[in-house]
Image (cartoon, helix red, strand yellow):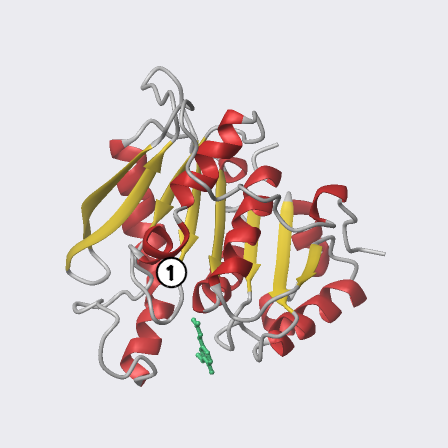
Amino acid sequence: MSSIDHDSIRHTAPPGFDQYREDISRGQIETVEYFSTTVGSKRKAMIYIPPGYSEDQRYNVLYLLHGIGGDEAEWYNHAGPQVILDNLYAERKLAPMIVVLPNGRAMANDRAEGNLFDANKLKAFEDFESDLLHDLIPYMESNYSVLIGRENRALAGLSMGGGQSLNIGLGNLDRFAWIGGFSSAPNTKEPELLVPNPEEASAKLRLLWLSCGLLDNLKYVSDRTHSYLELNNVPHIWYEESGGHDWPVWKNDLYHFSQLIFR
Ligand code: FER
């Protein structure tokens, strides 16, 4: 049995998990620009700095990716991740972490406009691997007080970003120990290509999380990945939840996933 049974995820997030609370400490959200050697231009990312951030400490980093219709502001605009995370810190349920919200469409015009399924736009989601590894992570490591080990780096995302997280994370286990795919899209590699060496993946992963809404038309992608992992004894959390391809599902995923990483 290689699915991890985890008490805390039997339920959806409690009421109020995403509601702004008075009288708690708050993190900060900022937008940065970094130079991408991959794209050859400046690119934006949003950053969430946890409450009490201090340069005297070094922080874990979660890179949290958006879907095909989004950009670096998608999580911020639709999910208020800073509210969810501030509330979790107030309840002492999170290990301190910086959360980076990148733009996963690594091309000169990275806005979510025009035909989102154009071949060059889909390729830009693949090219993001180089942008992340060679441009954005080094930028974070030069400009913020961050920990740089594989166990201090997590990668997760929704839909197109879920596929990216699985492809990039599982393809670079020397860089990421905590990986999450939320409602992963058909850009997710076939399982045999995604995890060609189940024993190595099992040894290196601290957490592999797969979740999907039961009403999501893309659920077959998560199902096929889960089946392969199960068959090959790769420990992972398998979380099926009510809902479709939508924000209530992804907010719930962030609530749970964030509590499990950097432990
Ligand atoms: C597809 C259907 C959906 C696909 C990607 C998506 C690459 C992405 C959806 C999203 O990010 O919400 O066939 O192929």
Q: Quadrant of residue 236?
A: bottom right
| Residue farthest to the left, as pictured | 41
**Residue 234 location in percent, x, y?**
74, 57
Q: Residues within 10 Å of mark 1 (few under 14, many from 20)?
A: many
Q: Secondary structure at mark 1?
A: helix
Relative to residue 50, is residue 231 drawn left or right?
right
Kindly identify which residue carries mark 1. Answer: 129
Nearest the camera: 256 or 37?
Answer: 256
Q: Residue furthest top?
A: 56
In the image, what residue occupies the spot 49% across and 33% down?
87
Name the quadrant of the N terminus: bottom right
| Residue drawn at x 21%, y 52% as measured from the top left | 44
Image side of residue 253 versus residue 234, left or right: left
| For residue 23, above or below residue 212 | above
Q: Specify whether residue 172 is in view.
A: no
**Which quarter of the rendered image does ligand 1 occupy?**
bottom left
Q: State the image quarter where residue 241 is shown.
A: bottom right
- Residue 123: percent from the left, percent from the top? 33, 76
Question: In this orientation, which residue lies closer to the viewer: 168 or 45?
Answer: 45
Q: Position of residue 114 (x, y in %)?
A: 22, 81
Determine if the C-beta at disc 1 is less than 8 A from ligand 1: no
Residue at the (44%, 69%) spot, across then down: 160
State the quadrant of the C terminus.
top right
Residue 192, image x, y percentages: 65, 73
